[in-house]
Amino acid sequence: MSVSEKQRRSQEKYDKANMAILATKAKKEDIEICKEYAKQIGQTPSKFALLAMQYCIKNNIIFDNEDK
């Protein structure tokens, strides 16, 4: 079922007022691992990333700045 024009405009208005995009640059293989894992657990990559960030913040998980 398609979304009506009024619903689409309403969603765009809400998103503009309340949402933002957070992007990152990562190695292709890391992105693919993340996408596959998210798929395995029934999440979109975006939802998985958001939940992972929220979990780390809530649990004060701090990573070092060094790459592997």
Image: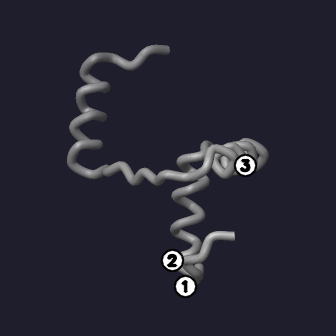
What residue is pinned by disc 2? 57
Residue at position x 30%, y 34% from top?
Answer: 11
What residue is pinned by disc 1? 60
Alpha carbon distance from label 1 to label 2: 5 Å
Label 3's element? helix
Label 2's element? helix
**Are dots 3 and 2 in contact, CB under 8 Å?**
no
Q: What amino acid type is highlighted by mark number 3?
A: Ile
Q: Residue furthest right?
A: 40
Label 1's element? loop
Q: Nearer the viewer, residue 14 or 50?
A: 50
Task: Specify the quadrant of the image occupied by residue 61.
Answer: bottom right
Alpha carbon distance from label 3 to label 1: 24 Å
Please state the horizontal and vertical placement of residue 56, each as a whole percent of the image.
57, 75
Residue at position x 59%, y 79% from top?
Answer: 63
Marked residue nearer the N-terminal end (3 or 2): 3
Residue 9 horizontal side relative to residue 24, left or right: left
Marked residue nearer the N-terminal end (3 or 1): 3
Residue 13 horizontal side relative to residue 19, left or right: left
Task: Specify the quadrant of the image occupied by residue 62.
Answer: bottom right
Residue at position x 69%, y 46% from top?
Answer: 29
Please state the horizontal and vertical placement of residue 45, each as a whole percent of the image.
60, 46
Q: Residues within 10 Å of mark 1 (few under 14, many from 20)?
A: few
Q: Nearer the viewer, residue 25 or 22?
A: 25
**Are dots 1 and 2 in contact, CB under 8 Å?**
yes
Quadrant in which the C terminus appears: bottom right
Residue at position x 23%, y 43% from top?
Answer: 16
Q: What amino acid type is highlighted by mark number 1?
A: Asn
Please state the horizontal and vertical placement of residue 64, each as a whole percent of the image.
58, 81
What residue is pinned by disc 3? 33
Alpha carbon distance from label 3 to label 2: 22 Å
Residue 32 horizontal side relative to residue 4, left or right: right
